[in-house]
Each structure stands twice: as C-alpha cells, then as structure tokens.
Image (tube, helix red, strand yellow):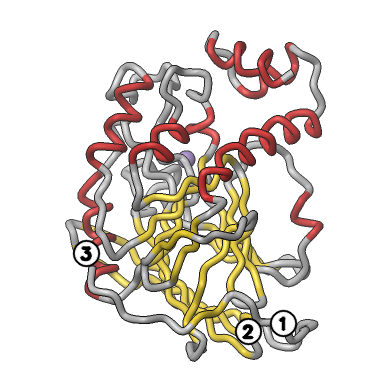
Amino acid sequence: MEKDILDLFKQGYSFSEIQSKLNLTCEDMSVFLTSINDKIYSHYHHIKFYENGNRRYSPNLILDTGIITNKDSESYKAMVISDTHFGSISENKELLDTVYDYCIKNNIHNIYHLGDVIDGITGKPEAKYLNPEEQVSHVINDYPSDSSIINFILLGNHDLDIIGSNYPLHDAITSNRKDMVCLGYGTREIFIKNDSFILKHSILIDKTDNNYSKKLIFRGHSHQMKLVDNLNNYYIYAPSLSNLQFIDGVIPGFLTIEYGFHNGYINECIINHYGIIDNKIINMNVNRINLKGRKREEIIEREEVLVKVKH
Ligand SMILES: [Mn+2]
C-alpha cells in the first residue's frame, strides 16, 4: 500500500485525492504516515538532545523524542515557530533571521517548527521556485543555523505534497542538516523530564488528541495565534513566520514558551506571543497556563547534570 500511495504522490495527486482513489480510510492513511514517520525517526535512535543545544551519541536505543534537561533546572525555555512557506512569494527569510537572533540573545537553544516549512508545489502563482527539488535545496542552503541551537522540525501538509519527489524534505534534512531534527509528518510527542507536550500540523482528521489529558498541544496550520482550553487539553496555535496571512491585520510572529516544573511535571506554561514588523519585535500578549493538580508519579529519567560546552 505504501508504494501505491507514494507512486500517486509522484504523479502529482494530493493526499485527499489519493485517499479516495485507493478507497482508503483515515486509519489507512494514518498507518501510512506512521510508517514513514518511524523510518524518518530511526535516524535519531542513537542521539540524545539537550536543552542547551547539544546533541550526543547514545549507545542505547531511544525511540521517543526527548529533551534532556539539567537535573537542577526547574524551568525550560524554547521558541515555537510555524508555517514559513519557503519557496513561495510569501516567504520572508528575514523573519527567520530575526528569530535566530532573538534565540541567541535570549539564551534559547531549542526551536520547534510546527510545519509547512516549504510551500510545496501547489500549482498556484505563489510558487517562486518551480520544482520541488529547488524548494528543498533552498531550505537546506538558506535556512539559518547556529551551533548552539537545535531546530526540531515537524512537517505539515505542504511539506507532504512533495513526498513523492526525488528529493523529499525529510530526506534532505536527515542527510544534510545536523542542526535540524526531522520529527516526521503531522504529529509528534516531545518528552521532557516526567512529562510531555505535543506538536501537531493538521494533515488528517485525527483523533489522537483524545489519547491525551491536560496536555499542551502546539499547532501549526492556522497562521494565527490562538489559545483554546477545550477541557481535555490546551491548544496553542502558532502564528505564521511568513507573509502569508489569511486574515487582514494579522502579522507574522513567533511564540516563546517557558515551563515551570514541579516533581518533573510541567505545572505552568508562560506563552509570549511576539509579532514582527519591519524587523522590530513587538510583544502582542502573554498567557499563563496553569497545569497544577494533574496526576503525578515520581519517575525522573530525562535529566542529567549538564556541563557547559563551548560552541
Ligand atoms: Mn501553512
């Protein structure tokens, strides 16, 4: 089935066209994505990622995506960006440079990208780079990098559009960019201390949110910052870091997140939403999510005593 699906992607069919052409259910499509995602993540089965931007070889097999934090630390800071749409006329690389500068100045070493890194081939006049390979090379060559920053990259529906090409984005990232970690398409859970949070980009109608309770779920795809408490989980929609905006008056931007921990569990999350206009960073709003009072167990495994390493 996987080969049939990839062949149709190669022929230029979209995800939903393939689904109806092969008469596949959402579950079938989710099995396909999970299989692709497992293959992608196998590249990182022996690498540990650290909050201070380091990555080290691990002799043990690591199947989950986890961040190792300092044993003594009771907080964690990270950057959340989304929807850069490289390769379209709405792309704005200066915004990404601004984000990297901000991280370096503010001691942030982990960036989470929530998908739609490239625009893919949409057949619309917005496509600046005509073929998928050029769009992907553009990311590999021109996306900023810094030795003190790990960029965790989830892939979205636009990135998926070119999965059938000779040079899909996930292959390009895993083989060329050591500073990036490709998390696969659509969804990934990130473990930190005793807890976890979820990254998502809508590709399928997926019901996995029901598997979680009182989790922070960060979402790309909406191109607008929004906070939703749906009683089960907290949704944090990230703004787009491109000029592609769906609603008048919305400006590109990013989120910084800061977790406070208790017994290794996230008990508070502070989200700062920043907009960028003419290279100026504007604080749009601050939100605090209180996660105290959830079920806890005492197992701490994702902590180490971190030694400061010069980059
Ligand atoms: Mn998008």
- Residue farthest to the top? 11
Q: Label 2 to label 3, Cα distance in Å?
A: 30 Å
Ligand 1 neighbours mark 1 (CB distance < 8 Å)? no
Neighbourhood count class around disc 1 (C-alpha, 10 Å): few under 14, some 14–19, many 20 upward: few
Left/right placement of residue 182 relative to residue 292 reads: left
Query: What's under tag 2, amino acid-wise?
Result: Gly
Which label was assigned to residue 184?
none
Q: Position of residue 289 (x, y in %)?
A: 59, 79
Q: Residue at x 77, y 84 (%)?
A: 296
Tag 2 residue: 264
Q: Does label 2 or label 3 sit earlier along the sequence?
A: 3
Label 3: which secondary element: helix
Neighbourhood count class around disc 3 (C-alpha, 10 Å): few under 14, some 14–19, many 20 upward: some
Tag 3 residue: 101
Label 1: which secondary element: loop
Q: Residue at x 22, y 54 (%)?
A: 97
CB atoms of marks 2 and 3 within 8 Å? no
Q: Label 2 to label 1, Cα distance in Å?
A: 8 Å
Q: Does label 1 or label 3 sit earlier along the sequence?
A: 3
Q: Does label 2 or label 1 sit earlier along the sequence?
A: 2
- The quadrant of the picture occupied by the N terminus is top right
CB atoms of marks 2 and 1 within 8 Å? yes
Corner quadrant of residue 99: bottom left
Tag 1 residue: 299
Query: What's under tag 3, amino acid-wise?
Result: Asp
Mark 2 or mark 3: which is in front? 2
